[in-house]
Image (cartoon, rainbow, N blue to C red):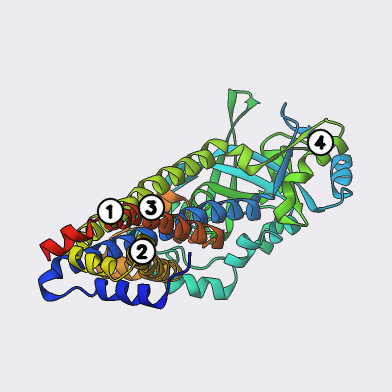
Amino acid sequence: MAFSPVERLISLRYLRARREEGFISIIAWFSLVGIALGVGTLIVVMAVMNGFRVELLNQITAVNGHLGVTSGRGPISDYQPLLDKIRMIPGVAGANPVVEGQAVVVSPDGVRGVMVRGMRLEDLQARRPIARSLTPSAVRREGQRSDVCGPRGSTSTAVGERGRLEDLADGGGVALGVRLAEILGVKVGNDIEIVSPRTVDTPVGRIPRKTRVRVAAIFEVGMFDYDSNFIYMPMEKAQDFFDMPDQISLIEVFAADPGNYLRLAPRISDAVEWKAYAFDWIEANAGFFNTVQIQTNVMFLVLTLIILVAAFNIVSSLMMLVRTKGPDIAILRTMGASRGQILRIFLVDGMGIGLVGVGLGVALGMLFVRNIEALRQGIQSTFGVCLFDPQLYLLSELPARISGGEVVSIAGMALVFAFFATLYPAWAATRLDPLEGLRRG
């Protein structure tokens, strides 16, 4: 639909209401601001929800691997042939054995249930989130950032020195998360006691199996669940602790192409001849990720209604404009303007409000998303409030990931709402009787 220069000029003059028509202009501004706020808010919320889901999955796969292979019936015995077969599959970047089990850790200042993972030292050093958090630069960076959401107002550096993963090599050291170290009140070099639910026969009866270890390293991967519940120890020691000689709990698999790791699952199951099966971490945490998706859909629907309400304001402002401009419409009709031209004049008015509102909303939303973590830190430090509790959301930073396709979809949806909101007032303007308009004018 082409709009002539005359139609655009008249539409612009109609939007600049005279003093006696100022209320109409105010309603038009409210419509514009409402659409801008609705679009901007929807972009921010969708970016945060997408960032939360993607960052959570990235953190999980960076620490645990893209896929896990388990027998489903207990420990995996004679696992070396399985490892060799999995590593030979095209698309597999690496496969590591892991011993895993639940335990209770005891220190002079606390007791907590934890997940103990036994890994080979070289495999643990290859876990970039863990190894990177122990570098001096990471420790300094964390020391400069306070955490008002931390337990008892502590900071992430309250545990002091972070230690080294190499110190696990002697078999008597373990690495634990920074939050767990804070809860237990331990630092590098302190001793802790780990108690297994498995029991051992003694002359006085069955007692829990336990071991005393030294804290060799304190890591921080940025996920509260890992930083507060996980302990890593050498694989041989974990096998002895859990009474799993020459056995492992699962095999972690890393894909060469992280975007296509799901395609590896059936290949791995075929390669190991179904003695074990592969699963991905979305499948293992299906309930959690489904909840996140449902929350995203509900928030999208609610915020879409805000944009719809703002679009209804366009209807009211244009209807008032049509009533006010009745004599002008009558004069235009008597001068030869067709109904199509009158329709296009008011379409330009409504779509102009919609376009400017959507443009402002997209700009505000993108600006807010790109600075959302800095804004969160500023508000928290200024007012001393916790806006994003890592204990609740499992991440230490507020994530945001902008999807170009979603931004275009949101902007397009808002423009469609604005277009349909403009149709009825524009059609009503074409139905005005010129004689009646001239009589009232």
**Earlier residue among tags 1 and 4:** 4
Q: How many marks?
A: 4
Q: Is residue 340 visible?
A: yes
Choose top left, top right, bottom left or bottom right for residue 337: bottom left
Q: Which residue is mark 1?
A: 431
For the residues labelled 3 and 2, the Cα–Cα distance comes to 21 Å
Instruction: Name the mark nearer the viewer: 2 or 4.
Output: 2
Q: Is residue 396 visible?
A: no
Instruction: Name the mark nearer the viewer: 3 or 1.
Output: 1
Q: Amino acid at mark 4?
A: Ser
Q: Amino acid at mark 3?
A: Phe
Q: Which residue is mark 3?
A: 420
Cβ–Cβ below 8 Å for labels 3 and 4?
no
Answer above or below: position of 131 versus 116.
below
Cβ–Cβ below 8 Å for labels 3 and 1?
no
For the residues labelled 2 and 4, the Cα–Cα distance comes to 71 Å
Give the x, y percent position of residue 117: 64, 45
Q: Residues within 10 Å of mark 2 (few under 14, many from 20)?
A: few
For the residues labelled 3 and 1, the Cα–Cα distance comes to 18 Å
**Earlier residue among tags 3 and 2:** 2
150 or 308, nearer to the observer: 308
Task: Tell me what residue is drawn at x 39 percent, y 57 percent.
Answer: 419
Q: Residues within 10 Å of mark 3 (few under 14, many from 20)?
A: some
